[in-house]
Image (cartoon, rainbow, N blue to C red):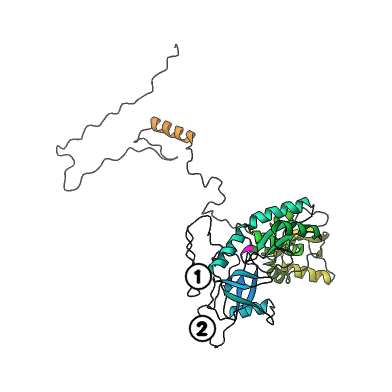
């Protein structure tokens, strides 16, 4: 395995990982982080002389913070730096520099009155200590889960993060109710011999830290690019005409999927032109109610109150006209008379999507068809093929010689060939 990450020079970096298991330098490789940042202003020179003194530093998983470059160090994306922490110092990787840092600080409302500082570029000792404590995190997480389970605490320890100088360890946990940590912190401090910090996270943040593949077949949005977790409720599914099925609407975090909010605004804009779903129509046959809405086709389905099995679909413009007639005190004619029959368009299945055996390469030939073909070859001769119905079998015409050659130099007709009829052998009934 080899990782060719450029940690010095210009801001560009590349990763030449050749292993299927990933890059071993995941702690220092700029391309291996989740929620990676693309600097779209990297090729543009700043027209203002004063440059931004702040840089964005990334730690384990999705934890980021802004630090001030007081020593004017030549930093770029992927640089390993030693930063200020409380207590001691921490080690992280620069994830963003330049003018985009100001935009991110303004977006996240980061106070710049007393900013944290960048001490130096990480030396070899800092990196070795950082990597040693990172290797202990998995075993510490297992031991911490055993201790919490022995104390019968209703919580789940999701992740463990050591500080770069091994002076503090942070435990991320999820819990439904409030947890008493007095005995737990004493056990952790006696076992791990370091400062303990407990931080509660939500179930969505837990899925973002762990990662995984969603039902769509792609990496989870929360672990790849999504940073703000908005609340999702069942109204988003109702507006999009989705069935309220918890098994299909819930993600790996156990909550409703974040992608339900992606197209919600478009659905709300389209539904603003629709009549209410509680619309009732007064017809000569009886009252009809709305039973279904199709946002893409801009149609509404109605059914009678006494016969809800028969559905009738109408465009929303026609429905608005019916509602206007009802407001004037007029009853519309029955729905079956208003329904216009649509001509079904015949489509050709060019790629055979509806064929069940389209992937079968070796198909068995039809034995009955081959048997019939063999019988036809036995019973008929090439010169006596069956003619279509209503026509007679004419013998094949003799070939005519060219004009410059004589067909028969002797002047006599050639003798006709005699064909012997072949009959199948008679069966002896006495046998």
Residue neighbourhood size for the residue with mark 1, other residues' Cα within 10 Å, grouped as few (<14), some (14–19), many (≥20): some
The single residue placed furthest to the left in the displayed view is 410
Which quarter of the picture shows residue 144? bottom right
Q: Which residue is mark 1?
A: 7
Q: Residue at x 65, y 63 (%)?
A: 162
Camera-near label (2 vs 1) is: 1
Q: Position of residue 375 (x, y in %)?
A: 42, 31
Residue 223 in the figure: left or right of residue 430: right
Which residue is nearer to you in this view: 125 or 211? 125
Q: Is residue 225 magenta?
A: yes
Q: Choose top left, top right, bottom left or bottom right for residue 224.
A: bottom right
- On residue 159, the disc is none
**Circle 2/circle 1 CB separation < 8 Å:** no
**Would you identify the image quadrant in which residue 37 lies?**
bottom right
- Judged from the image, the secondary structure of the residue bearing numbered disc 2 is loop
Residue that carries the numbered disc 2 in the rendered image: 45
The answer to whether any part of residue 253 appears in the image is no
Picture residue at 47% right of the left edge, 64% below the top? 4
- Mark 2 nearby-residue class (10 Å; few <14, some 14–19, many ≥20): few
227 or 70, which lies in front?
A: 70
Closest to the observer, 134 or 331 = 134
The C terminus sits in image quarter: top left
Residue 345 image point, x, y percent: 59, 58
First in sequence: mark 2 vs mark 1: 1
Which span of residues is magenta-colored? 223-227
Q: Is residue 39 left or right of residue 196?
A: left
């Amino acid at each position: 395995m080899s990782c060719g990450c450029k940690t010095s020079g210009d801001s560009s970096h590349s990763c030449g990982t050749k292993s299927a298991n990933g890059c071993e330098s995941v702690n220092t490789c700029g391309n291996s982080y989740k929620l990676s940042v693309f600097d779209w202003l990297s090729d543009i020179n700043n027209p203002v002389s004063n440059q931004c003194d702040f840089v964005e530093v990334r730690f384990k998983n999705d934890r980021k913070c802004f630090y001030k470059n007081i020593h004017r160090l030549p930093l770029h994306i992927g640089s390993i730096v030693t930063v200020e922490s409380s207590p001691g110092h921490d080690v992280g990787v620069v994830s963003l520099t330049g003018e985009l840092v100001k935009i991110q600080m303004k977006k996240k409302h980061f106070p710049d009155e007393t900013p944290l500082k960048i001490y130096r570029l990480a030396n070899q000792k800092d990196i070795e200590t950082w990597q040693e404590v990172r290797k202990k995190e998995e075993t510490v997480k297992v031991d911490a889960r055993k201790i919490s389970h022995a104390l019968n605490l209703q919580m789940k320890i999701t992740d463990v993060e050591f500080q770069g100088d091994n002076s503090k360890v942070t435990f991320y946990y999820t819990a439904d109710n409030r947890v008493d940590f007095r005995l737990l912190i004493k056990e952790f401090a006696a076992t791990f011999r370091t400062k303990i910090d407990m931080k509660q996270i939500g179930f969505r943040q837990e899925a973002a830290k762990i990662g995984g593949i969603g039902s769509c077949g792609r990496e989870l949005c929360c672990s790849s690019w999504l940073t703000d977790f908005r609340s999702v409720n069942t109204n988003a599914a109702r507006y999009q005409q989705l069935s309220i099925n918890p098994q299909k609407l819930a993600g790996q975090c156990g909550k409703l999927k974040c992608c339900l909010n992606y197209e919600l605004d478009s659905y709300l804009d389209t539904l603003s032109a629709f009549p209410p779903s509680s619309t009732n129509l007064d017809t000569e046959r009886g009252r009809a109610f709305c039973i279904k809405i199709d946002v893409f086709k801009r149609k509404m389905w109605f059914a009678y109150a006494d016969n809800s099995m028969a559905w009738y679909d109408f465009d929303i413009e026609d429905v608005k006209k019916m509602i206007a007639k009802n407001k004037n005190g007029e009853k519309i004619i029955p729905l079956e008379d208003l329904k216009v029959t649509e001509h079904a368009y015949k489509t050709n299945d060019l790629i055979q999507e509806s064929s069940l055996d389209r992937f079968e390469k070796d198909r068995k030939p039809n034995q009955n068809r081959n048997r019939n073909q063999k019988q036809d070859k036995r019973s008929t001769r090439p010169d006596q093929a069956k003619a279509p119905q209503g026509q007679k079998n004419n013998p094949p015409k003799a070939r005519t010689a060219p004009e410059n050659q004589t067909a028969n130099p002797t002047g006599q007709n050639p003798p006709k060939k005699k064909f012997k009829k072949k009959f199948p052998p008679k069966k002896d009934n006495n046998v």
